[in-house]
């Protein structure tokens, strides 16, 4: 029964203070992490919108190129027929 005294002794005051300090530091780290994640979400949204704009521009360039090719071939065909 000597084991009970080893595990169930009262905690010294300095250990309680240390634990309180650690808990406050962990709370601070938690808020920093949440702020970092919210900032990352905003940055991801901005990158997505930039990517969409770039994709639309690429589609516009491709469409213009295709239309120019079609009109060029139509012009060549009309020259040979006329």
Image: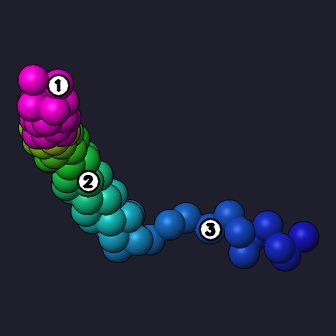
Front residue of 33 and 11: 33
| Sequence-wise first label, 2 or 3 | 3
- Depicted 37 relative to depicted 82: above or below: below
Residue 28 lies, with reference to residue 54, above or below; the image says below
Q: Secondary structure at mark 1?
A: helix
Kindly identify which residue carries mark 2.
33
**Numbered label attached to residue 45:** none
Q: Name the residue beneath numbered marker 3.
A: 9
Q: Find the magenta span and give its range.
A: 61-82
Q: Nearer the viewer, mark 2 or mark 1?
A: 1
- Indicate whether 32 appears above or below 73: below
Q: Is 6 or 20 nearer to us in this picture?
A: 20
Residue placed most toward the observer, 12 or 17? 17
Q: Is residue 63 magenta?
A: yes
Residue 81 disc label: 1
Horizontally, residue 20 falls left or right of residue 78, namely: right
Which residue appears at 33% of the width and 70% of the height?
18
C-alpha separation, residue under disc 2 versus residue under disc 1:
71 Å
Q: Quadrant of residue 63?
A: top left
Left or right side of 57 for 3: right
Residue 6 sits in quarter: bottom right
Find residue 64 and report its horizontal and vertical position in percent.
10, 33
| Of callouts 1 and 3, the N-terminal one | 3
């Amino acid at each position: 029964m000597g084991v009970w005294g080893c595990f169930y002794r009262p905690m010294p005051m300095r250990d309680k203070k240390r634990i309180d300090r650690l808990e406050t530091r962990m709370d601070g780290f938690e808020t920093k992490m949440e702020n970092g994640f919210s900032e990352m979400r905003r940055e991801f949204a901005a990158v997505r919108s930039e990517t969409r704009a770039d994709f639309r521009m690429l589609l516009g360039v491709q469409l213009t190129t295709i239309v120019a090719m079609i009109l060029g071939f139509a012009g060549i065909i009309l020259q040979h027929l006329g």
